[in-house]
Image (tube, helix red, strand yellow):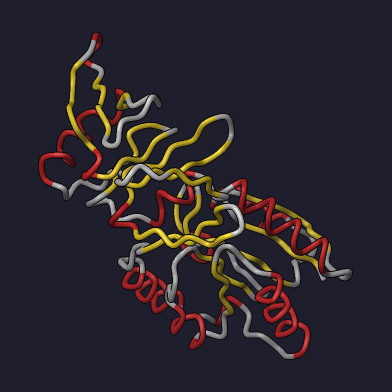
């Protein structure tokens, strides 16, 4: 079975490729793409369509709907999403399967068995506008909590109790308002898609802050802004120059989309 993966998050790409090739003997990955443009180009020029496409909704240069509108897709599509209950009804109605990140082997097995055992409606017959509307509605349901591994335990952290996320030395960390620090197995790019932009702002490539964690805001040379975070941290808490205006608007109103 030939599989095409369309996913812009490197960690998610690698995890899906590893799960598919390790656990299923008949799988061959025929391509891994990260954007709308690359996907359209690949599909327009391919000599043989894949048997299945695994496709994320949010891509580096747009949404997956743009692919459907720009080229013809004659194979089943399995949507992969980070949101719980993310347009599930729309996928079921349109005979598209869906998988929630992080994708489990059991979920993969179920989706692949479905493709092998019965005819799945090809993407060209799907009502894309209905799918787009359902996903746009469901996308407002932002992440409410994270389940994290801590030693031999599973810890649940409510999003309302999170101060900030940051990356350091290739790792992602979560800091709570109470000062508890946890290692995470997902990237800031993935996290930024899951959070309510009214409450969280990505101040730089390496840090996402909660409105509750912002203490003092100080201007430095070159009109750069440095934050004092709560709880205190020695991480780089400068706001990127390109984000300064949006950050100040977000901080004042709480309504600016900052992620």
Above-or-below relation of 205 to 257: above
Q: Is residue 170 left or right of residue 145?
A: right
Residue that sits furthest to the left in the current view: 252
Residue 75 versus residue 229: which sits nearer the camera? 229
Residue 201 position in % (x across, y down): 29, 42
Quadrant in the picture for residue 78: bottom right
Look at 38% across and 24% down and name the residue there.
Answer: 234
Residue 175 versus residue 78: which sits nearer the camera? 175
Look at 18% across and 20% down and name the residue there.
Answer: 218
Above-or-below relation of 148 to 52: above
Quarter of the image that includes the N terminus: bottom right
Residue 102 position in % (x across, y down): 58, 62
Residue that sits furthest to the right in the current view: 25
Residue 207 position in % (x across, y down): 39, 35
Residue that sits furthest to the front in the current view: 152
Look at 78% across and 83% down and name the residue there.
Answer: 116
Look at 40% across and 57% down and name the residue there.
Answer: 194
Residue that sits furthest to the bottom in the current view: 118
User: Can residue 40 be seen by looking at this rendering?
Assistant: no
Above-or-below relation of 103 to 206: below
Above-or-below relation of 108 to 197: below
Q: Is residue 258 left or right of residue 8?
A: left
Residue 165 versus residue 247: which sits nearer the camera? 165
Residue 136 position in % (x across, y down): 34, 68
User: Can residue 52 be seen by looking at this rendering?
Assistant: yes
* Tally of numbered tags: 0
């Amino acid at each position: 079975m030939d599989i095409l993966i369309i996913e812009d998050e490197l960690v998610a790409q690698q995890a899906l490729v590893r799960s598919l090739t390790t656990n299923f003997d008949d799988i061959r990955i025929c391509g891994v793409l990260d954007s709308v443009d690359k996907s359209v180009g690949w599909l327009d020029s391919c000599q043989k369509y894949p048997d299945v496409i695994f496709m994320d909704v949010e891509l580096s240069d747009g949404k997956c709907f743009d692919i459907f509108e720009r080229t013809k897709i004659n194979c089943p599509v399995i949507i992969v999403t980070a949101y719980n209950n993310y347009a599930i009804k729309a996928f079921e109605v349109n005979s598209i399967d869906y998988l929630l990140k992080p994708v489990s082997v059991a979920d993969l097995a179920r989706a692949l068995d479905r493709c092998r055992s019965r005819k799945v409606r090809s993407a060209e017959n799907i009502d894309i506008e209905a799918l787009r509307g359902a996903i746009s509605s469901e996308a407002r349901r932002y992440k409410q909590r994270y389940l994290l591994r801590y030693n031999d335990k599973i810890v649940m952290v409510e999003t309302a109790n999170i101060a900030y996320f940051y990356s350091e030395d290739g790792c992602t960390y979560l800091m709570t308002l109470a000062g508890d620090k946890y290692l995470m197995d997902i990237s800031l790019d993935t996290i930024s898609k899951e959070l309510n932009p009214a409450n969280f702002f990505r101040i730089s490539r390496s840090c996402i802050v909660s409105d509750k964690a912002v203490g003092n805001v100080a201007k430095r040379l070159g009109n750069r802004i440095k934050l004092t975070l709560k709880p205190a941290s020695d991480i780089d808490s400068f706001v990127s120059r390109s984000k300064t205006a949006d950050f100040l608007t977000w901080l004042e109103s709480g309504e600016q989309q900052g992620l």
